[in-house]
Amino acid sequence: MATTPRELITARMVSEESHHAIATALIDALRPHDGKKFTTRLLAGLSAAVGQAVRYSDHLDIHKLICGEVGLHLGLGKGRPMINIAAIERGNICYLQPAVARNAERAESLAGDWPEEADRLATVLKGAQAAYAAHLAKHTDRFGIAKLHEIEL
């Protein structure tokens, strides 16, 4: 578990890069089958293409490919879905380009001292909150005053 902002940001970058790689590999493996019906034979080949186990779920008529922590949405409805790459990319956008953009933003924040500054400001904020609470502690109207300042005690 991350104990600093730098560790948390780094862990999320690694996780998102992994999810992006898996989703991209699954979509690339499905691309030659665009417009065809999804079959168990196709499912068998996906694990080899991605390099890890892939399973299919159609729980509540929501069709997904599951690989590790990635659940690639294929579509909705009864029976096996048709493979529609454009729809799959739209339905799984969180794993694709926005993931790359989020990681670029994370990398930019890690390049400087932003995570350490966030730590420092959190320490200052906690100290100020404690001092504020101590200052108001014995006043009869402490909760009303704190509400006026929009600060929770």
Image (spheres, rainbow, N blue to C red):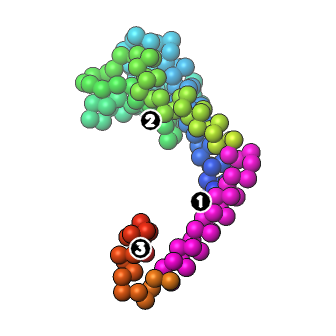
Q: Residue at x 36, y 82 (%)?
A: 141
Report which residue position mark 2 lands on: 71
**Vertical relation: 48 (above or below) 124:** above
Mark 3 or 2, closer to the camera: 3
Q: Label 2 vs label 1: CA separation?
A: 23 Å
Return the residue at label 1: 1
Circle 2 residues within 10 Å: few <14, some 14–19, many ≥20: many
Residue 78 in the image: x percent, y percent?
25, 24
Dot 2 and dot 1 residues touching (CB under 8 Å): no
Q: In what quadrant of the picture does the C terminus appear?
A: bottom left
Look at the image and tell me in which quarter the N terminus lies.
bottom right
Could you tell me what secondary structure mostly forms the magenta stretch? helix
Q: Is residue 98 left or right of residue 81?
A: right
CA–CA distance in space, label 3 to label 1: 34 Å
Q: Is residue 22 visible?
A: no
Q: Mark 2 belongs to which amino acid? A: Gly
Instruction: Depth check: give the residue in front, 108 or 124.
Output: 124
Q: Amino acid at mark 1?
A: Met
Upstream in the sequence, badge 2 or badge 1? 1
Corner quadrant of residue 148:
bottom left
Q: Which residues are magenta?
A: 109-134
Residue 150 against residue 56 in the figure, above or below: below
Q: Which residue is mark 3?
A: 146
